[in-house]
Amino acid sequence: MIQSNEHITIYFALMIVFTSLHTGNGQYKPAYLETNMVENNARTNTFRVIQEQTTAMAFEWKTMTHENFGYVYLLQDIPYGIDRTVKVYEGNIGLLEAIGEPCEHSKYRAEGYTNNLFPFNFDTVGLAYKRVPRINNVQIQLRSNLYSHVKWETERTACEPTDSIIIFRGYSNQSLKMYTITNNQIEYYSDEFKTEEGMEEVFIVFSKHGNRFSLPTMDKKPVWKGNKEQSTNQTKPSNITVSSFLENISTSSE
């Protein structure tokens, strides 16, 4: 069931969606996806998720200092399995080729080690990150009447019954229209948003869980007589931060 279909510009639509990631108590905050900060105590903000990618997670941590500093060991804790790890020798940002299961609180840590013959763990920070289920295999069809029919698959069932799916639809040179639908839907047919030949239709689809969002799936499709009743290629989630989401709004996902 559609809950909202108000016309809004691309910029303001996305700013509205990501407001909870940008503000707190009326003040601007960096758009961390998750942090180990306790309440509003900035001193405890020592480890944070700064980007979720298709198969990796990017982290930032407080600078770890030691007179014999060697490296930071970034890892995902895998219960009853082999932890996924990477060593970061410089800086306080690292990319870990690992993602947790959707709807589960996966545990991540950054451990500082010395460069001694027997490395010593002198500092550790950690957090738990719950990934929102992604939308996969999105396909868009143009019917003979040039109305669009969109189908997709979900990575798994929703984390909570109150979760939803958000769709932005429109043309690349115009404002997009936002739809919020229930999490159990896997298709949407628009009989009020007719495409016109020669235009380029854009759609963005992602899941919403509380104030968190899944990796968005983006695609665009030129509208010609020759592509009526035909599907686009299946799309995959894009590695997009909030800022690059706005910058790359007109680019299709890989």
Image: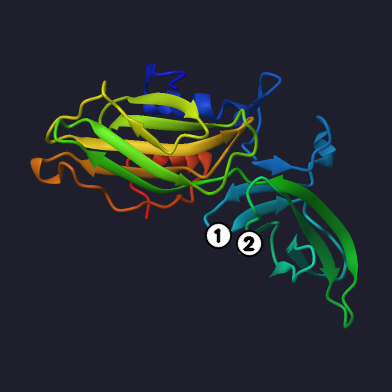
Closer-to-camera residue (170/143):
143
Q: Which quadrant does the N terminus fall into?
A: top left
The spot of residue 79 in percent (x, y) is 79, 63
Q: Is residue 198 above or below residue 129?
A: above
Residue shown at 84%/36% (left/top)? 38
The spot of residue 25 in percent (x, y) is 71, 20
User: Hey, what amino acid is under mark 1?
Assistant: Thr
Q: In the visual, does 218 lie left or right of 87?
A: left
Residue at image mark 1 = 55
Residue shown at 78%/57% (left/top)? 109
Q: Is residue 171 above or below residue 253?
A: above
Q: Secondary structure at mark 1?
A: loop
Q: Which quadrant does the C terminus fall into?
A: bottom left
Closer-to-camera residue (7/24):
7
Residue at image mark 2 = 98
The spot of residue 118 in percent (x, y) is 89, 80
State whether residue 27 appears in this view: yes
User: Hey, what amino acid is under mark 2?
Assistant: Ala
State whether residue 172 appears in this view: no
The spot of residue 202 in percent (x, y) is 30, 37
Is label 2 in contact with label 1 (beta carbons under 8 Å)? yes
